[in-house]
Image (cartoon, helix red, strand yellow):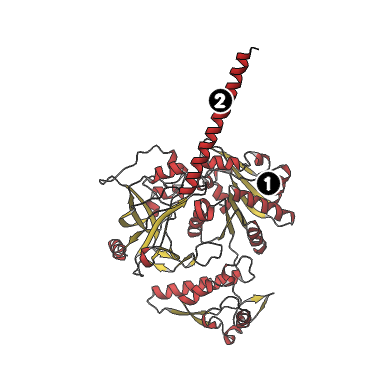
Amino acid sequence: MATVRITEEDLRSAMRDPRYWQFGHPERAAFNAWVTDGWRALVDAREGGGSAAVHVRAYQRVRNGRPEHVSDYIQTRHRRGHQEPPRGGRMAPDSEARTNTEAAPSVRPVVVFVGGAGDRSIGQIVRRSWLAFRRDHPAYETQYFTHDEGDELRRFVEAVPPGTPVNILGHSWGADTAAQVVAALGTTGRTVDRLVTIDPVGRGTGRSFFSRVRAGARHWVNVNATGGSFFHLPNMIAGLGRKYGDGPREYAHTYIDTPHSHEAFEEMLNIPGQGGRRVLDLVLDR
Amino acid sequence: MTAALRDMISAARWLRISVLLVGALLLSACTLMYLVTGGPNLHDIRLESLEVVDVRDRREYWHDREEAKSRIVLMVTFSSPDSLVEFHRLFGYTIGAEGSLCADSDQVSRNQLIALGPYVYDGAARVDSYERRQMNLREQKDEGGRHQYHFFLELRTRAEPADSRPTPDGYFVEHDLRRDPHDLCFHLRGGSMAGHRHRSSTVVIPYPAIRAALDRAGL
């Protein structure tokens, strides 16, 4: 197997490459795996008192099941004035790329978090939960979206290789977005494994809609927050935004009323659900 | 119906409408003022102590004690003249910690983030949790009348984007407390579902203090 010398700067540069962060990019899984392996090698070398550079297998993209020379790809993009190539093109010289092997695609179960209004930059109710989940559950591929990223969420799910478990958790407007996407995907025959809607808020309610949501998920868990007064600010905002309330009761595979108030996303993930298992346990299938 | 009775009904109707109008105007004015001036911020946050702990032993960290797993982290204790629990209760703000390698002028740098928190705790629970609001606990103050809180800082941070949306900044850096001699900076931030956000003053964690805490733990 051909190897290539990399440094921390090379890896940082690689993380800014669209192949690393762009949803639905055909090389994303393989490129992520390569970058992750690079970091591991670098950290292990440092902990062992080694140098600031290590040699790892060279990255090679695979398109339509066939290996291609990465350097050709980089040069083409560079000519068009797109993203800067990795520093010095060192990651995959031609001579090395020809003998590379394909990076294994990710087969980790996917857990997607979808936050409500202002979640990314202001309240971070769901985003913090996602950050903690990402730290505590490395065995899962995980992503975060907000309620206004329904198209991105849909593309992300569609890009997940068939057979990979996909679980989506949403809160408030984010739960509504998650339900809308699952309903739409279901009509195309692409179902998700678990959909968890935590106190959803939105206008896309109705029997027909709930039926499509149910059809789009192998298991739909809906949690309805009933605690606190209407004048508690998060409850008021949810109320004005039009909560699903108990609308999904007859449609969700698991329906839970809980005495929490609207913003208690983290707590509602941890309440006992079916068979005494926590809602989060249902997602983690344990 | 007499003319006097009709006048009384009419006056009552006008009175009710007037009260509603005045109430609506007052509410609008208050809302506008709140939106223009913004909500309050936390100031005078001070670093109190650093201690290496195992999160398995920290009750406040876990929703379910049976889930408790061992992980060695640095517990960063800080103090505030204001109660964070009350801050959350009054304004509906979430309260999280965010930190990085100290940038110029000792500020948190969004492209040199380190893994901490993201939650802030007192001895009982997360300060901005539903559970904490339900607890009827009297908050303890130290001798200086200040409230003490803490968050947990990972010994090692993995380099990765801080978010799934591509942004020009917002990156965690590869960092190991045991190896990399950098001062760290943190602040508290969060917001409410009404759209307000807050950010505290920045606190510096000097590397010698980190090294001393690690030395005490034999790391």
Callout 2: 10 Å neighbours few (<14), some, many (20+)?
few
Whether labels 2 and 1 share one chain: no
The amino acid on which the numbered mark 1 sits, given as a three-letter code, is Gly
The one nearer the camera, A153 or B216, is: A153
The image position of residue A147, as x and y in percent, is: 60, 53
Please state which of the two labelled residues, at mark 2 or mark 1, is closer to the viewer.
2
Asked if residue B216 shows in the view, the reply is: yes
Quadrant of the drawing holding the N terminus of chain A: bottom right
Callout 1: 10 Å neighbours few (<14), some, many (20+)?
some
Which corner quadrant of the image does residue A49 belong to? bottom left
Give the CA distance from mark 2 to mark 1.
40 Å
Q: Residue at x 66, y 59 (%)?
A: A151
The one nearer the camera, A199 or A96, is: A199
The amino acid on which the numbered mark 2 sits, given as a three-letter code, is Leu
| Residue of label 1 | A204
The image position of residue B60, as x and y in percent, is: 40, 48
Q: Is residue A223 above or below residue A91?
A: above
Q: Residue at x 51, y 59 (%)?
A: A134
Label 2 residue SS: helix
Q: Chain of mark 2?
A: B
Q: Is residue A240 above or below residue B103?
A: above
Label 1 residue SS: loop
The image position of residue B125, as x and y in percent, is: 41, 46
| Residue of label 2 | B15
The image position of residue A114, as x and y in percent, is: 58, 54
Residue A153 shown left or right of residue A88 in the figure: right
